[in-house]
Amino acid sequence: MANDGNRVNPINYLIIHHSAGPAFSEGSDREVADWYSSVGKGRGYKNYAHSYHYDPRTGKETFAQAHYALHRYSGDKNKYGWRLVLLIRDPELNVSWGAGNWPVNQHGINIEICGDYSYKTIDPKALLLITDSFIYLDKRLGGNLLIRGHKEVSQTGTACPGKIQTQMPILKDMFNNRSKYENLLVPPVVVPPPPPVPPVKTDAEKLKELQDIFDAYKNEKELIISDLEGKFASAKIVLGFTGDDVEFIDFLKSVKLKVDAYDKWTGWAKQLGNGILAIISNIKNRKNGTK
Ligand SMILES: [Zn+2]
């Protein structure tokens, strides 16, 4: 285990930063880790040959000045849409140079949020990932983890973590009332669109459809009952009847009554009326076994 010898227990500070650098949205761990190492090499470690910190993936020396970097990442379909990248191996045994306050660093875990948050706040789901990742520290301390924005602890002066500072009370509340925030992670319920409602046919429309069926017989001198019977099934389909023949007959009767009532006893309607009566009597006869 790599141990730089600087740690002082307990670890009771969690310090939040923004990098004011690239957001690394959907970037790789490698990309993120390399950037923080190279920036640290040019800043805090400018005059140091070694950090004695090691990249957890490559084992190579890293000059990152925070233990973790947080960025948008959904490639692994995680429930936050954010990813915490470990920058320094064995974070509990190694002190990162992030807070501008050596004793706080010695007791702290530094987290860099990738991107420039000088003028914007961060997605609360990112804060929830921080909460879920470090709530174990708070539990270990009996609820006494000190969660701070960089500027609250810096002895050198800084605007870091930008506008995220205004969200520190939310982050603290997440640690204290975690269940209250679970709904942030619940995907929105997708309400399926209601099934299309078949248009309700008016009596006039039904009559029109019946007329069309019987129009096929317009030029026939006689309605042949057997032909009508052939149309009986198709009439049911056209009119959308799913019920049995008895129900259909009831409908046909009502149509007949309406036809009478409307006094639209045109030639087709007479045919229709006669045809219906023929069908009805035919079916009655068949049921009675008289056909
Ligand atoms: Zn900072």
Image (cartoon, rainbow, N blue to C red):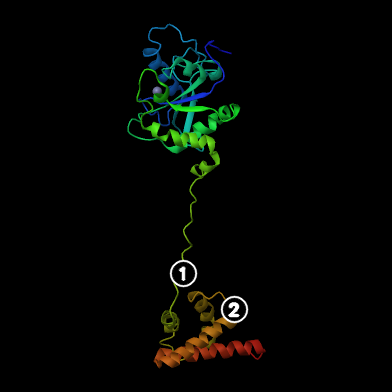
- SS for tag 1? loop
Direction left: furthest residue: 119
What residue would you read off at disc 2? Answer: 244
Kind of residue indicated by mark 1:
Pro
Label 1 or label 2, whichever comes before in sequence order: 1
Q: In percent of the image, x 32 and y 33: which residue is there?
A: 119
Q: Are marks 1 and 2 in contact (CB under 8 Å)?
A: no
Please report the residue visible at 41 percent of the width from the left and 89 percent of the height from the top. Answer: 268
Residue 256, numbered label: none
**Corner quadrant of residue 124:** top left
Residue 41 appears anywhere in the view: yes
Disc on res. 198: 1
Of the pair 2 and 250, the residue shown nearer to us: 2
Q: Is any atom of residue 57 visible in this view?
A: no
Percent of width and height locating residue 10: 56, 20
Quadrant in which the C terminus is drawn:
bottom right
Q: Position of residue 128 (x, y in %)?
A: 49, 35
Single out the mark in the foreground, 1 or 2. 1
Give the image quarter of residue 244.
bottom right
Front-most of residues 13 and 161 = 13
Task: Please give the name of the residue rendered at 41% of the width and 19% of the height, measured from the top-left corner.
Answer: 36
**Residue 151 versus residue 129 in the image, above or below:** above
